Image (tube, grey):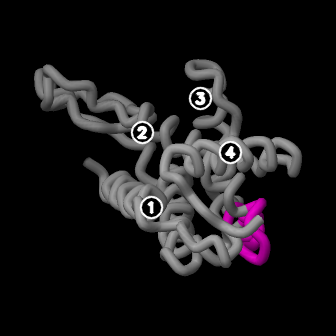
Amino acid sequence: MQKDLWNMLIAYLEFQKTITNPTGVQDENLSLKDNFEKDEILKTLGIFEDKLLEYMKLSQLLGWAVDPQEEKEFNFQLFPGSSNYEDYQTDYRQAYLWAYNQYHEIVQPLKMNLPTLGSPKEKFDKAFDNPELAKYYDLISANLKLVNNVEKPHLLDTNEAKTKFDKIIAYYSKTFNWKYKN
């Protein structure tokens, strides 16, 4: 498993642990944002965002792999794993697609709709603003579009983020009986 993948998954579990805490988001005198702050949901959300962006920067996704049958043969892997595990898929494409969905379906809507939390734009721009890697991002994005019908990472528009935010809050409020001041 890649280090960035490991870090991303640990951050996801920590975020889920805080957001699904049955005793969290229960103070009806506090706003949703203040409940999130009190219960450290904002902190774990920020860490999760950082780890998703780090993974989505694709720093470990291009590589060469040695075919164990022909050690003189190398093959290019867009999402490298290892061909040493015959019974398991080792291509990390699914992990990238998962990270992409988490970022666009959970992190951005929450960040864009909780007052004073800040826009994800600054971190997003910083993560993907590397002219030296632009040609690689273009290659990878074209492959993801062709194979998986996934667009390049992007910032959501305000309306889309608000719609997704409302669905997230409705789901968690119902499932975990959240109480907060509107």
Q: Which numbered disc covers residue 144?
A: 3
Q: Do the residues under discs 1 and 3 have CB atoms within 8 angstroms?
A: no
Is 65 left or right of 8, judged from the image as shown? left
Q: State the image quarter where residue 180 is shown.
A: bottom right
Tell which circle, 2 or 4, labels the residue nearer the N-terminal end: 2
Residue beneath disc 1: 15
From the top left corner, tell me how far across and down residue 130 is, in percent.
67, 62
Residue mark closest to the camera, 2 vs 1: 1
Q: Earlier in the sequence, mark 3 or mark 4?
A: 3
Residue drawn at point x = 58 percent, y = 78 percent: 37
**Mark toward the start of the polypeptide (1 vs 3):** 1
The answer to whether the residues at label 3 and label 4 have Cβ atoms under 8 Å apart is no
The image shows residue 173 at horizontal and vertical percentages of 59, 51
The residue at which mark 4 appears reads as 153
**How far apart are labels 2 and 3 at the CA level?**
13 Å
Residue 105 in the image: state x and y as whole percent: 64, 43
In the drawing, does residue 150 fall left or right of residue 22?
A: right
Is mark 2 in CB contact (under 8 Å) with mark 3?
no
Of the residues tagged 2 and 3, which is closer to the observer?
2
Can you say which quadrant of the picture contains the C terminus? bottom right
Q: Label 1: how many residues lie within 10 Å, few (<14), some (14-19) or many (20+)?
A: many
Q: CA distance from mark 2 to mark 4?
A: 14 Å
Q: Nearer the viewer, residue 125 or 168?
A: 168
Q: In the image, which residues are magenta?
A: 112-125
